[in-house]
Amino acid sequence: MNWWQRLLRRNKMEEQLEKEMRFHLEQHANELIAGGVSFAEAQRRARMALGGPEQVKEECRDARGTRWVEDFWQDLRYAMRMLRQRPGFAAVAILTLALGVGASTVMFTVVNGVLLRPLPYPQPDRLVAVHGHTETWNAKLYGEQNVAYPDFLDCKRESRSLTMAGSIFNDGTVSGSGDPEHVDFQEVSSNIFSVLGVQLAQGRAFLPEDDQPGAAPVAILGHSFWQRHFSGRTDALGASVTLDSKLYTVVGIAPAGFRLRDTEPDLLTPLGQDIAKFLQSRGPHPVGVVARLNPGATLAQAQEELSLIGRHLAEQFKDTNADRSFKAEQLRPHVGDVGSTLWLLLGAVGLVLLIACTNVASLLLARAVSRGRELAIRAALGAGRGRLVRQCLTESALLGLFGGALGVGLAALGFQPFVAFWPGTLPRAEEVQLDWRVLLFALIVSLVSGVLFGLAPALRAPAGELEQVLRAGGRSVVGNSRRLHSTFVISELALAVVLLVAAGMLGRTLLRLTSLDPGVNIRNVLVSRMSLSPGVLADNGRIRAAWQDVLERARRVPGVQSVAIVDTFPMREGNNTLGYWPTADVPPEKERPLTLATSVSPEYFNVMGIPLRQGRFFNEQDRMGGEPVIVIDEVLAQQAFGGGQNAVGKRLWMPDMGYGPFVVVGVARHVRHWGLAGDDQAQIRAQFYYPFAQLPDKYVRRWSELMSIAVRTEIAPLSEVESLRRELRGAAGDQVLYEVRTMEQLASDSLALQRFLLLLFGIFASLALVLACIGIYGVLAYLTGQRVPEIGIRIALGARPGSVVWLVLRQSVGMILIGAAVGTAAALAAGRVLHRLVEGMQPIEVSTFALTIPVLALAALFASFLPARRASRVDPVIALRQD
Amino acid sequence: MHPKSDLPQGTLDLLILKVVALGPVHGYAIAQRLEQVSRHVVQVPQGSLYPALHRLENRGLLAADWKETDTGREAKFYRLTAKGRAQLETEAASWERLTEAVALIMKLSEGGAE
């Protein structure tokens, strides 16, 4: 008989086994009787010789190899019965686990979507990103380099192993019917969709003939843009869109959720049609290159090829391409630094899960101890120790699975709000979904926690000394389990301390950061990006005039106190860094210290309320042709000249500016450019300001695409938005304000991550606190319950209620002290991790412990007071009669 | 009576195969035969006989049929399969080699270590 037959013909097998044993015993007994032994004695001796028919049968069943399936089924039914018998126990255990598994699954769903899932293109492992590469470039600080357009065309033509596509970011104004709108669009090479393997939702992709200078302007709409402007109508195909005063015919619509270089473009246009100067030169590097490995080619081959092409170009174009090469890397989603935050949260949630498991383990242990007699009877009836352990594990694994299933349900509800609450936008948020990985994770977590918390009680299954257990009942085993119970409670308390201290640290950090002075007066300041009318951008004189006009018009709006234009803002993305030197013999680029550069109109300091330390701010006389002037901040003054007093009148040389040297006319207060939290740890903190009016002509157009306006108002700034919009629309009606925020919002956003972490750690810590209290209550209630007869005797002998309460509390005080000590050590380690991962994090201080540990101790004492009081009210008569 | 020593590990299977090789035989008879031949020397616990038989049967070294005994009762008779016979031969051979080697070493130590 094979394995399956043995499994399926179980009854027949049992029957034959029984028959075989009976035959053996009868033969043996018959022989003994023939030798003169009495019938009863013969029966007894035959059994003795065989060594217990039931035990032998069990071993024979084991030999079948089908045992575990049968046992498993039996255990499963038995476990279900046990859970139904004690619905209260089952409900508490399952709910506790569901909370733990649910919270971890939410976190894992997010980690999975953001960090683990492959890119949403077919065969993502064949996709490659091509970057420019020079030895001196600090990719950690600035990100990877893109590629010059002519270089891209050369690589694309020469490469045999890669099919390359390129794209550049651009932005502009869509006008026509309705309000003008600022849009982000990308110019792409015609093959971008085929390289990525993406099918358009409607219409066609760009053709090679679209990708030429002078070809008819065509555009592909992003899905959201299509919904916004055409309400999803199919007649969008063939319609036209006015982008920067140029008419484009719509030929296709991108599929929903289509993202290119981690953003969803509003529009796509053919890159080859763009005749801008910076695309003709090998100097600027604007093109992001994505490529697909051709069949059979490897990444190493591609890299070799690119290095070769890079060398050829370097020889051919020494001015621009010397030392420049290209590198190919597997294409990965860009998620910035959220990774560390996500892992941190997954770790924290893991602690909550651990507490939940410990809780259930101590519940199970209490039950296992009171079930000691039942287990002993089973052992006496022939159940092996392994068999009993398996049965206990089946029960706890079943609990784990139920808890896990409920937890997945909670997670399915919970991950959307989590993504929505994420500060700013969570990268790849659209990828965060329940998928097979998440389900597998939840399954493994529930099973592992099932086995983990079931193991300790299961290993207590009786091995020897059955009769002692049987005779003593459940009570006498308490001594052994007390130590295990205390260990559980201590670990729960310790874990709760870690989470509480972490939450305390975050709270203190947030308090300190909120009280920091950002360096600007953030009350009543409105900031907004602004794009000028596309019509004026052709001519530098008209651009300067247009900005002057913007400033004058904005100043006329009622409620506006002062107004300025500026290229980069504090506490908002975007910065311009330059190397400087305080003498004329400027060293090579790599050796120059760096500073932030900000281009402003004279009113900027008034609008932002930046205090002047020395000298003067800019005025209308600082213009083209005059001496180049700058205002520096205290940090730069310190770094370059050793202090503010000496700085005014000194000079700085900055070759990247294209003019200079610059005379320092004033020293201003330092502004927290990198946000309230980030500025202290930022690599580049020094700042200087220069007048927009002195910006050389060659930069004016590019800068105008970046400029924002900043307005100080007398009334609530957001109520001014509409009148500003109306006033600044311009002669052609196509000037747009976009990304409108107040400085107060920006300051608050710069702490969003810290606030979010505090919220989550607060939730985790309270969850941990509640679970730990339930745990300590359950354990003490159980231990005290086991001691009722002893307490009864003490009371009968004259012990007062107070001393009985103390008898019970003494146990928990011990556990709380050890738990707090262990937790403190663990929290010190955890604090170091937090300090590294969270910007502006305060180091641990004694006060954090002094605040959090008493909270825990009081809660735990309260939880243990209930069983203690109950013990003091034990009626000695009833207690002594019990059992 | 000398104290009986325990059966060396793994030899029970070999002994069972050897007994069954002599012809179809039921469990009780195997137990008796083992006890007769090994009397005073080794302890064959009856309790471990049946699990061993069932294990050998499940591994396909033994086959079993229900037949009547001389006294007319139905019993489970074990016989050797071809696979069992091959197994018996290899195990017997290796047992022989082992005992020879052990005997050789014992003699060596009597003659004094070189």
Image (cartoon, coloured by chain):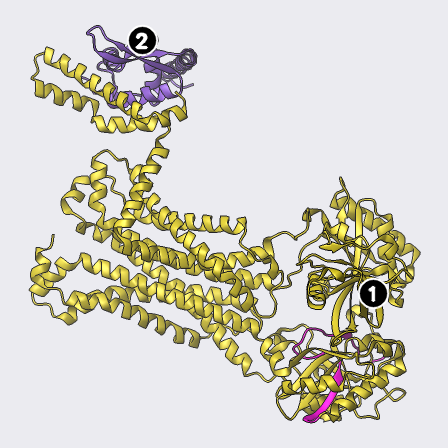
Range drawn in magenta:
A558-584
Measured Cα–Cα span from mark 2 to mark 1: 95 Å
Question: The residue tagged with tag 1: helix, strand or loop?
Answer: strand
Q: Residues within 10 Å of mark 2 (few under 14, many from 20)?
A: some
Which residue is at the front of the view, B97 or A359? A359
Q: Identify the subunit bearing mark 1.
A: A
- The tag on residue B24 is 2
Residue A569 covered by magenta stretch: yes
Tell me the quarter of the picture where residue A734 sits: bottom right
Q: Give the colour chain A carries in the figure.
A: yellow
Question: The residue tagged with tag 2: helix, strand or loop?
Answer: loop
Q: Position of residue A751 (x, y in %)?
A: 57, 75
| Residue assigned mark 1 | A248
Q: Position of residue A382 (x, y in %)?
A: 23, 33
Answer yes or no: are tags 2 and 1 on the same subunit: no
| Chain identifier for the purple-coloured part of the image | B
Q: Is residue A234 left or right of residue B104?
A: right
